[in-house]
Image (cartoon, rainbow, N blue to C red):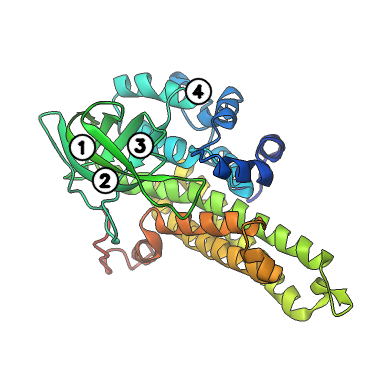
Amino acid sequence: MNFDLSDEQKMLAEQARGLLSERSPYDHLRALIDAGAEWDESLWRELGEMGFLGVAIPESFGGLGMSALDLGVIAQELGRCNAAVPYYSSIILCADAIRLAGSDIQKAEWLPKLASGEVVGTFAYAEGPGPSFATGVKLEGAKLNGSKTPVADAGIAQLAVVLVAGGGLALVDLNQSGVTRTKLESFDQLRAHYRIDFADAAAEMMPGKNVLATLLDRAAVQAAFEATGAAEACLTMARDYALDRQIFGRSLASFQAIKHKLAELAVEVELARSNAYFGAWAADESPDDLPASASAARLTALTAFENGARENLQVHGGIGYTQEANCHFYYRRERTLALGLGGRDYWTDRLINHQPGLQGQISSGKAA
């Protein structure tokens, strides 16, 4: 196991960072919010043309067939620039769900379209506040009934993978008459959330069984990469401001309290990055290690991003809380990421339950 990126992966990261820094600067994000846009469609098309959307999709279904770590490299750069694209919903969750649970016909129909960006997908699992992955949506006779909320990026998605009663997954065309989408108030203005109501909506069951936990583990690893990239951006932003800001005739960065904040955050970022690397390795090479490694990656990345977003605000002082400062992009995205995929309690229980000698001793009862 190598805890560093290969030369090819470093080139991939540089390519993604160069594109995103040019196409998705903070002024552009602010303009998208002012225009009421839910995503950056032109950037999405460009990511598709460059192959970034199909990195982990098999070559036989229109992707590049690369590894979970390669996908993480892209996710980390998207987190670093807070990009307004549905990568997490469409690629990390929807495409991976189809790859894990779909039939060959379903994979052949949808994965090439997701890889090219022609179709945007999402994954609908939550049914309101609470820690569990509820399954009140019922699929009977190819007709789907019930509600899912919140569902990220559902306003721009044409396709959804829906968690149904019994723990199975179903494919649903969101543009049909039996589907109603209602936009919710979202704290993150660059990642909209919706409520979806299904009323006898046509749905297609996916044949794969018992894939939910694996799907969430794999998504947690990629979310950890996104959070790590964003936390590192917060650290850099706070450091640069502290070096530039003069107070009482000296640099703000010269105060020991500021140095301690930044040093502790740097340690948290590196710990989160190491755990994300291990989780990506386990996703491809060691399925037995995936539950614990994904949980560790999820938890350490949540801590790094939460502290990074908050300390960045603190270092900036009063100006950090205004819309004119860029800190708020990360604070809003951090809250959104923290509340998805079951939250901290679920992942803490999962980590403990998958430690050697403790398997099964603690029952969370919070997910399939």
**Distance of mark 4 from mark 1, alpha carbons?**
28 Å
Q: Secondary structure at mark 4?
A: helix
Q: Earlier in the sequence, mark 2 or mark 3?
A: 3
Amino acid type at image mark 4: Ser
Task: Please say if the residues under marks 2 and 4 sit with CB atoms less than 8 Å apart.
Answer: no
Q: Secondary structure at mark 1?
A: strand
Q: Is residue 149 left or right of residue 82?
A: left
Q: Position of residue 230 (x, y in %)?
A: 60, 53
Local crowd at mark 2 within 10 Å, few (<14), some, or many (≥20)?
many
Q: Earlier in the sequence, mark 3 or mark 1?
A: 3
For the point 34% across and 30% down, the residue is 159
**Distance of mark 2 from mark 1, alpha carbons?**
8 Å
Amino acid type at image mark 1: Phe
Q: Secondary structure at mark 2?
A: strand
Q: Position of residue 244 (x, y in %)?
A: 83, 64
Q: Which residue does the numbered mark 4 point to in the structure image?
A: 116
Q: Is residue 267 visible?
A: no
Front in this rendered view, residue 91 or 319: 319
Q: Which residue does the numbered mark 1 point to in the structure image?
A: 198
Task: Please say if the residues under marks 4 and 1 sit with CB atoms less than 8 Å apart.
Answer: no
Label drawn at residue 148 = 2
Q: Earlier in the sequence, mark 2 or mark 1?
A: 2
